[in-house]
Image (cartoon, rainbow, N blue to C red):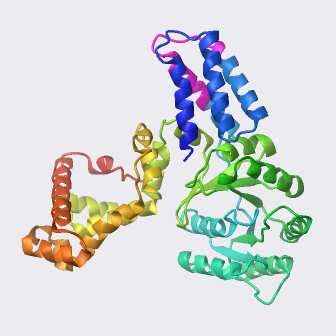
């Protein structure tokens, strides 16, 4: 996420490395590199200039404490300015009403339908809502079917009127349906176009007028950079939307949209999304994103993601098994599944301070788990529950059943034993603190 921007900003800060104090000369050189990095990231020149002028002004007004190097001070100033540029504070989703209505808008291909389902899943699993998804895209082939498939995955009902070509009437009927079915939030997935046109804008405006949404979220493909910002301005002038969603952050994202959009339309970024999995949706925190861009990690988000996957009952059971040295392959498989649900592994590692740079050139995929899962899947239930019984002949059978070499199985078994030994040493520690599985 924003790897090129992170690298260039890191290079800019090196201008101050080894410098004993901040001077007009070294600040000017650093600021010049920062501005170049922003423009390369597809940030509008005017925004980049105002941003770096503010950094220069703040840096020259600072006295460097003995314990703080000029480079550290500059990173702190840039982090604060990046956070402010992207909105400063978290913007809370407004979902109060009977029902609350959330209207989803954006261009075709921006990821509206997938985001609509992700939002429904988020509101259902993390906020306790009872959502109703509405298929109001009557133009794109298979749009209704796509939303229904996603709805089945997350077990959320999808309202559609296949014989109707009137999205305004569909949205209005959906709100009535939600009231009669005690659904307390309605998410309306509207149609997009390949480009902004008057027909599209009129249609979305008419849906807004008909259902009076509490939130209008504009979905932006973050890979389109400054073009996305320009499109957002057109939509906002007409719809006055309440927030922005950045999708496809796992792609080749330069960062221009995330850094420019709040400044341009004065509307907050509310969510960021990556990948196709329903769990890969995050509330947008400007300060945390600024930290990640600057390679400072984001431990808070990482812990929150872990807590969302581990409930207290599971934690207690796992704790007891580790205490008794009974951690087995079935437990291990469950942990892998929970890690996968947290999101992209490389992104998760990037949240750990200092690790992002170390793994940026390494290809780390969630598919890396497939070989391990295949080996565990080739074990009998008895073997999974009793790892110590797996002798050489059983290992050969597991290798054959999983399509792996015997060396792969031996290596995996050795790693598993090392992990169990490590867990033995953890038995002397306060378990919940050691595992990070305390109460939420």
Residue 359 screen position, x and y as percent: 40, 45
Instruction: Tell me what residue is drawn at x 19 percent, y 50 percent.
Output: 422
Instruction: Tell me what residue is drawn at x 79 percent, y 42 percent.
Output: 264
Residue 299 screen position, x and y as percent: 45, 43
Residue 83 screen position, x and y as percent: 63, 36
* Residue extent of the magenta highlight: 59-79
Residue 277 screen position, x and y as percent: 52, 66
Residue situated in front as seen by the camera: 383 or 433 = 383
Instruction: Tell me what residue is drawn at x 68 percent, y 48 percent.
Output: 91
Count the marks. Answer: 0
Can residue 145 be seen from the camera position used here?
yes
Q: Quadrant of residue 107?
A: bottom right
Residue situated in front as seen by the camera: 211 or 281 = 281
Residue situated in front as seen by the camera: 172 or 400 = 400
Q: Quadrant of residue 406?
A: bottom left
Q: Quadrant of residue 2?
A: top right
Instruction: Tell me what residue is drawn at x 18 percent, y 66 percent.
Output: 409
Q: Is residue 336 left or right of residue 277?
A: left
Q: Is residue 133 left or right of residue 328?
A: right
Residue 62 included in the magenta stretch of the image = yes
Residue 133 included in the magenta stretch of the image = no
Residue situated in front as seen by the camera: 162 or 357 = 357
Can residue 310 be seen from the camera position used here?
no
Residue at the far bottom in the pictured view: 163
Q: Is residue 356 left or right of residue 391?
A: right
Q: Is residue 46 above or below residue 274?
A: above
């Amino acid at each position: 996420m924003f790897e090129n921007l992170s690298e260039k900003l890191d290079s800019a800060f090196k201008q101050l490395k080894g410098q004993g104090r901040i001077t007009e000369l070294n600040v000017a050189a650093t600021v010049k590199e920062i501005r170049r990095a922003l423009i390369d990231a597809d940030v509008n020149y005017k925004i980049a200039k105002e941003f770096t002028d503010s950094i220069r002004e703040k840096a020259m007004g600072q006295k460097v404490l003995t314990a703080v190097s000029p480079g550290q001070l500059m990173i702190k100033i840039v982090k604060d300015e990046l956070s402010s540029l992207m909105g400063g504070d978290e913007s809370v989703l407004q979902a109060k009403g009977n029902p609350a209505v959330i209207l989803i808008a954006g261009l075709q291909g921006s990821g509206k339908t997938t985001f609509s389902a992700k939002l429904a899943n988020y509101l259902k699993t993390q906020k306790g809502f009872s959502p109703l998804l509405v298929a109001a895209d009557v133009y794109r082939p298979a749009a209704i079917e796509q939303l229904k498939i996603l709805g089945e995955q997350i077990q959320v009902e999808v309202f559609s009127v296949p014989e109707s070509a009137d999205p305004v009437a569909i949205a209005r009927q959906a709100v009535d349906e939600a009231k009669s079915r005690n659904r307390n939030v309605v998410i309306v997935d509207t149609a997009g176009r390949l480009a902004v046109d008057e027909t599209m804008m009129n249609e979305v405006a008419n849906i807004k007028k008909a259902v009076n949404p509490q939130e209008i979220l504009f979905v932006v493909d973050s890979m389109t950079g400054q073009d996305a910002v320009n499109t957002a301005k057109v939509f906002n002038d007409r719809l006055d939307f309440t927030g922005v969603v950045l999708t496809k952050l796992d792609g080749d994202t330069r960062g221009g949209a995330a850094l420019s959009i709040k400044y341009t339309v004065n509307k907050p970024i509310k969510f960021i999304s990556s990948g196709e999995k329903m769990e890969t949706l995050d509330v947008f925190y400007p300060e945390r994103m600024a930290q990640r861009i600057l390679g400072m990690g984001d431990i808070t988000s990482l812990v929150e993601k872990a807590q969302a996957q581990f409930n207290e009952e599971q934690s207690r059971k796992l704790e007891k098994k580790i205490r008794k040295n009974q951690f087995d392959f079935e437990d291990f498989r469950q942990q892998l599944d929970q890690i996968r649900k947290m999101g992209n592994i490389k992104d998760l590692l990037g949240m750990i301070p200092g690790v992002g740079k170390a793994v940026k050139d390494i290809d780390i995929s969630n598919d890396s788990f497939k070989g391990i899962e295949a080996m565990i899947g080739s074990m009998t239930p008895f073997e999974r529950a009793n790892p110590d019984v797996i002798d050489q002949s059983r290992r050969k059978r597991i290798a054959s059943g999983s399509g792996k070499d015997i060396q792969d199985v031996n290596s995996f078994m050795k790693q598993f034993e090392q992990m169990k030994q490590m867990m033995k040493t953890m038995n002397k520690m306060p378990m919940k603190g050691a595992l990070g599985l305390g109460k939420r």
